[in-house]
Amino acid sequence: MSAARSTSAPGGGGRRAGERVAEHVSPLELADYQKAVRLVLRHPLITSSYPDRTALPTVRRWAEQLRTDLMEVLGYRLVTTADTARLLRVQDHLDATRPAVTRAGRPFDRRRYAFLVLTLAALGRHGAQVALGELADAVAADAARIDGLGLDTTRKTDRDAFVDAVTWLTERGALALTDGSATAWAGDPERAEALYDIDREILTAVHQPTRVLQHLTSVTALLDSGSALGLATGRNAQRRDQARRARRLVLENPVAYYADAEAELLGQLRAPSLAEDLERLTGLAVERRAEGVALVDTSGKLSDIRFPGGGTVAQAALLLGARISEAARRTGRHAPDLLPAPTAAERLATRARRIDAALPARGLLSELSAPEEETLYEAADEEDDEAEETRYPFVTDSWLRGRLKEIIGEYGKGFAADLREDPDRLLAQVLDLLAALSLVARVDGGVLVLPLLARYRGVSVRVKSRVPAPRPAAQTALSADDTVKEPTP
């Protein structure tokens, strides 16, 4: 199953009486409208060339209805100009599953993110064009003022990281290469150069923060403040805010588990109108189970992670997930221990502490800091002790390593050689993927098995043999598309 991320509200969810999602869209055009919704949700920045040349006309055609529905249903604001469409999302939690990626398809590290932000700032000080070397010098000057960063253009690793940031902007149209080559400059800046046109409209669309950043002293201050609505705002405003948060919870996550949701959202998640609104908005199906609700994207047109999928990590994850699910069903003396999973609030607190610990202190005014900020992170420990605690089967790291070793022995001929020969790295990537899909929860010493993983319990896999070829080639390959059958849940 590949699940998207969305939810709706109870009893109307704050929409005015008689209002419907896609109210002014005819039945014959509804599928086209839903395509535009999925497009703008999948690509929050759309330009004349990104993600392709058909995207912007599609969104602009439905811009008025999109603005209305995305705000009413999700609280998202769509800003359109002649050459851009920018979706300003509401961020309720920290999400590490959608990183910017390098030219080689790897997630950005902290240095690349820093170079990207500094590049945006430097471009604001240039005219219509900029040479790559000149831009690098400007970014290097700014980076030198940041402890532990720096950009040394004599070092190939620094040049590569900087070019990854520039390429990210180029792919979205903020920069347009007119002469030279960034790759050649990264290889030898003494012999090569690159010249770019600057598109200020797209630059503005790229950087539209929803918070004023100068005086923020914690990462949680970047998140949506709607959950802090007080009684003074009125019940209707609170209900509308909770309805939007519930829809976002389903839209932005593979599954919304009831046990993981805040108490005030449970009614919204269970309301029939949630499915009605989200299905009509996205064209996808909402699936309900005893444990939670998910927006199911079988087409893969909305989800940022498709599973099952191709590649060694996805294939190994499917195989290991099936074994984990079977182990979770064991009874008697072989039954796994049952342990509670960290709640969403606890996970947010842990991530916030880690990020806040790395924030630079220079330039912050201590009097602007919250005097008891640490209590924000520990709030989850003050939950009502009488609340029923949900527990999940626990499997250990050593058990996982053993099962993965078996999988490599049986199917390893179809895996990438570098991962096959480094089982620990493969296991780490497999568990990262399963956790990102809310199939398991990573804890100290192992993982907790979450309910959605049961969907893959009965998968059957075979190794697909290839016809021998004259040239040297692997004789077997594991193909998820040809060999995996999903059980009927």
Image (tube, helix red, strand yellow):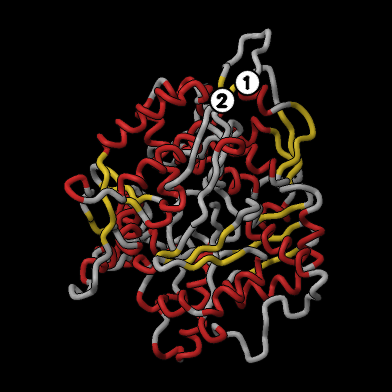
Q: Residue at 23% across / 51% down in the picture?
A: 331
| 381 on left or right of 97 | left
- The kind of residue on which mark 2 rests is Ala
Q: Nearer the viewer, residue 57 or 160?
A: 57
Marks 1,2: beta carbons within 8 A: yes
| 262 on left or right of 246 | left
Density class for disc 1 (Cα within 10 Å; few <14, some 14-19, many ≥20) is few
Percent coordinates x, y for residue 288 in the rendering: 49, 68
Percent coordinates x, y for residue 10 in the rendering: 51, 82
Question: Dot 2 lies on which element?
Answer: strand
Q: Which residue is mark 2?
A: 477
Question: Dot 1 lies on which element?
Answer: loop
Asked if 150 appears above or below 471 in the picture, the reply is: below
Q: Which residue is mark 1?
A: 466
Q: Nearer the viewer, residue 175 or 331?
A: 331
Q: Earlier in the sequence, mark 1 or mark 2?
A: 1
Q: Residue at 30% across / 30% down in the picture?
A: 402
- The kind of residue on which mark 1 rests is Arg
Please tell me whether mark 1 or mark 2 is closer to you in this view.
1
Q: Residue at 31% across / 51% down in the picture?
A: 329
Residue 352 occupies which quadrant of the picture?
bottom left
Asked if 124 appears above or below 225 in the picture, the reply is: above
Asked if 275 appears above or below 378 in the picture, the reply is: below
Q: Is residue 396 visible?
A: yes
Percent coordinates x, y for residue 479 in the rendering: 58, 32
